[in-house]
Image: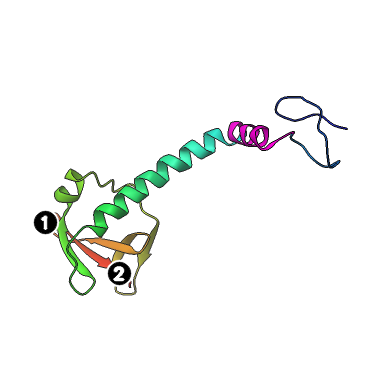
Amino acid sequence: MSNCLECGDKIIGRSDKKFCNDGCRNAFNNKHNKDSTNLMRNINNKLRKNHRILAEQNYVDGKAKTTRNKLTSEGFNFDYFTNLRVYKNGAEYRFVYDIGYKFLEDDWILLVRKE
């Protein structure tokens, strides 16, 4: 018999069990993953917010135009995107999941939505 890694109580059951119950297993894993989980949660929240802001724009045939100031005023954070694509013609698009954007002249931004 072994002891629970979280509370230290004796474990009854299979010989390879590490925790006495689901509560102890969850508490143990939450403690050990706390730092990375908080970091990932914060980043994912920012990405979700960015995606929501982009998705709310008025798209026509999968494209829309807006300004950097408008997106910033809605809370868009340009530091967070999921991938960067550079096309053969040199165009650089930053994507937040399925919605990409490219900086144009005079504060304008072109948005494209993959369908």
Question: How many numbered marks have been drawn onto this rendered protein structure?
Answer: 2
Residue 102 found in image quarter = bottom left
- In the rendered image, residue 22 lying in the magenta stretch gets the answer yes
Report x, y in % for residue 81.
36, 53
Badge 2 local density, few (<14 within 10 Å), some, or many (20+)? few
Residue bounds of the magenta highlight: 20-31
Residue at the top extreme, as displayed: 8
Relative to 1, is 68 on the left or the right?
A: left
> In which quarter of the view is residue 12 placed?
top right
Q: Which mark is residue 106?
A: 1
Residues at discs 2 and 1 in contact (Cβ within 8 Å): no
Going by the numbered disc 2, the residue's amino acid type is Gly
Q: In the rendered structure, which disc, 2 or 1, sits on the residue that comes first in sequence? A: 2
Q: Nearer the viewer, residue 14 or 98?
A: 14
Report x, y in % for residue 25.
67, 36
Q: What element carries label 1?
A: loop
Please name the residue that numbered disc 2 is placed on.
90
Camera-side residue: 13 or 66?
A: 13
